[in-house]
Each structure stands twice: as structure tokens, then as C-alpha cells.
Image (tube, rainbow, N blue to C red):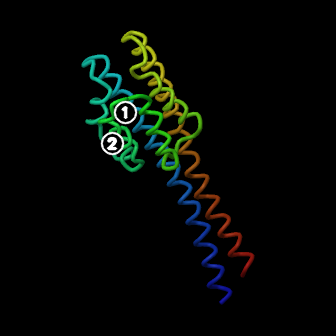
Amino acid sequence: MKWIGAVLCFCVSVAVGWMAGKNEKERTAQCEAFLEFFVYIQNQVSYFLAPTKLMYKNFRHEALQKTGFPEALCAHEEDEVYFDVWARALAECKDRLNLSEEQYEIVRAFGACIGKSNEELQRKHLEYYTNEMRAQTEKQRAQMQKNIKLYRTLGFSAGAAVLILVI
């Protein structure tokens, strides 16, 4: 019976390490998805002068689909007063987003500048936040590689320690 408990503790510790690594991968995927979305919106504004109601419709990314963010953006498409939709959609999906506070703030600020100024100023704002998200994504990728190894090693080590102590 003692062996079964020790093996169970070991397996749980290893699983916790793997789950923490999975969360890091998910955060990185969401950063990359938002970066793609930022570039897409920037292109829609710069080249097509697309209205905000229409530009959100055609973007698809699996990582964002899981959060429900694109659907939340498009849900207000038929509203007569189309104001602050980005902030409302972001607030609706906040619990499903796996972003750090800094990453979340960049996403919030990016949406806050859409459609709020003339074309040239808006392009500068969109470019600034796209570059900020690009830097955060690169930082997240590097951090993910390091953290996944750390979480897996810690999970295995903690499980092994419990296994040794119980035996």
C-alpha cells in the first residue's frame, strides 16, 4: 500500500510539472496569435481602410478561438452604438486568456487606439503596439523554453524526493 501511495505521489508531481509547461506553451501561442491579429488589423487599416466592424470577421487563429475573443468582438457587430467593443470583448475573455499583466495591457492598449484618431496617428499607434507585442512574444518564447525544462525537472525531482522519503 505504501508503494502505491509513493508511486501516485510521484505521478502527480510529474503531471503538475507537465501541466505548468503546458500553460507556458499556451501563453506563448496566445502571444503569437495576438501578434498575428495585430499585424492583420494594421494591414486592414493601412491598405484597405476597412471599417472596424468588418475587419474582425475574417481573422481566424486556433489559439484565439479557444479563448472566445474573436467571437466576442463580432458579437457586437449589429449594435447601433459600436463603441469600446475591444475592451468589452477582452473583459469577457480575461479568465480564458493566459497572458501576463504586461502582455494583457499591450492587447488592451492596442484595441483602445483602433478607430479613435486620424489615419496617420492610428497607424503609428498600431505600429508601436505591434512592435511591443513582437518584443513580448520573443521574450515569452525564450522564457517558455527555460520554464518548461524547469517545471518538468522540478516536478520529477519533487516526485522522486517524495518517492524516496516514503520508501
- Residue drawn at (53%, 42%) of the image: 99
Q: Residues within 10 Å of mark 1 (few under 14, many from 20)?
A: some
Asked whether, in this view, residue 75 is left or right of residue 139, the answer is: left
With respect to residue 21, does 80 lie above or below?
A: above
The residue indicated by pointer 1 is: 36
Asked if the residues shown at circle 1 and circle 2 are in contact, with their CB atoms under 8 angstroms apart, the answer is yes
- Residue drawn at (34%, 47%) of the image: 62
User: Could you tell me residue 54's position as x and y percent?
Assistant: 27, 30
- Residue drawn at (43%, 33%) of the image: 86
- Residue drawn at (50%, 41%) of the image: 91
User: Looking at numbered disc 2 in the image, what kind of residue is underneath it?
Assistant: His
The residue indicated by pointer 2 is: 61
Which quadrant of the structure image shows residue 48?
A: top left
User: Could you tell me residue 13's position as x and y percent?
Assistant: 62, 67
Q: Quadrant of the N terminus?
A: bottom right
Asked whether 143 or 82 is in front, the reply is: 82
Circle 1 SS class: helix
User: Could you tell me residue 137's position as x and y percent?
Assistant: 48, 34
